[in-house]
Amino acid sequence: MGEYSKALSFYEKSLGIYEITHLSNHPDVAASYSNTGDVYKDMGEYYKALSFYEKALEIYEKALPPNHPSLAASYSNMGLVYNDMGEHSKALSLYEKSLEIYEITLPSNHPLLATSYGNIGDVYDDMREYSKAFSFYKKSLEIKQRTLPSNHNSLATSYNNLGRVYSNMGEYSKALSFYEKALEIYGKTLPPNPPLLATSYNNIGFVYSNMGEYSKAFSFYEKALGMWQNTLPSNHPSLATSYNNIGLVYSNMGEYSKAILFYEKSLEIKQKTLPSNHPSLATSYNNIGSVYDDMGEYSKAISCYEKALGIYKITLPPNHPLLATSYNNMGLVYSNMGEYSKALSFYERALDIEQHALSPTHPSIKNLRESIETVKNKL
């Protein structure tokens, strides 16, 4: 939290100086608004981030020609926030505006075009439209392959993106193939970059975990954790991710006390470094709640799930998929407790969100409908 406060203080001073010494619609003032928005975005304060990005965009639209790269960057920044908020259609619209400017003003092999295609791929990946995500990630990769050396780290980023899509689709052997390509590049990087190597080990561990190959998952997660522990400060977010992933493996193996131990290590880092309503904290509360639910400690599970839900209600729009996950979790606990009317209420809220976000044939909707029928039959 301290670093965010320092950054905000610096940018606020900078903004004050610019507002005194420049005209209010000067691009330097817009840049300062944009920088402040970046900090709020990293803090998970999405509405504040948008407010500053919108101020920057308003100035750029008045001061610059309509195809200026700074406008494209503004659209991209806002798209990133909307995507994090789960407002995928807004994110897509803004990313497409950004891409349109870059396609008009830049050569076809420019790195910013590769970035734009990658951003749009991210939205489709989050929307679970994996074939479209793959198509845009591939476009991004093709530009990089034409313009960069074969061992460039940016190529590894593309391989990781494609690996993630295959992992999300359950095509684990293809996911491993792309993740291993990324690892090969990071392994040749000079000087060595342990955090990037650790990220690759983490990705590969995640695939093995999903495949149920827990010993292999552990091996890669432990490599990642060792590298991060040796190179990063003890409260770095990547360490929180690592502890979380190891906790997930223990949870899947039914070793619940170990799972909680690692989940709480992850949560402790987040509590020290993030605002109290950051969505990442909610993820931790959900994970811990899930273990307590599996252990039959339902009151503890509900307490954790309520903390997660409280954060999501403050920070996310009302139709965000993570809210559906929270409502579903609450429904599951109440169902396990035999409180079927409460379970039904939460399941129905989850279904309402999922129906707005997903196709009618999506497995999540099918599962929720089945849960609702099961609960209704027990009332």
Image: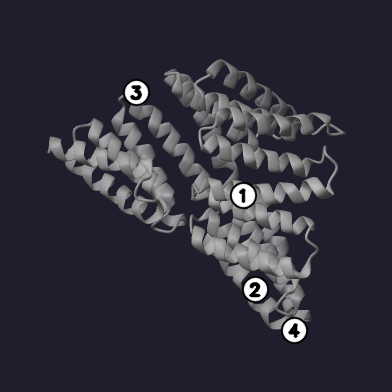
Mark 1 packing: few (<14 Cα in 10 Å), some, or many (20+)?
A: some
Mark with earlier residue (4, 2): 4
Q: Secondary structure at mark 3?
A: loop
Q: Residue at x 45, y 23 (%)?
A: 252
Q: Secondary structure at mark 4?
A: loop
Mark 4 packing: few (<14 Cα in 10 Å), some, or many (20+)?
A: few
Q: Is residue 343 above or below residue 249?
A: below
Q: Position of residue 20 (x, y in %)?
A: 75, 80
Marks 4 and 3 in Cβ contact (< 8 Å) = no
Mark 2 residue type: Leu
Q: Position of residue 172 (x, y in %)?
A: 56, 29
* Location of mark 4 (residue): 23
Q: Residue at x 76, y 44 (%)?
A: 154
Marks 1 and 3 in Cβ contact (< 8 Å) = no
253 or 1: which is nearer to us? 253
319 or 124: which is nearer to us? 124
Mark with earlier residue (1, 4): 4
* Location of mark 2 (residue): 57
**Distance between the Cα atoms at labels 1 and 3?**
42 Å
Q: Is residue 275 something that shows in the picture?
A: no
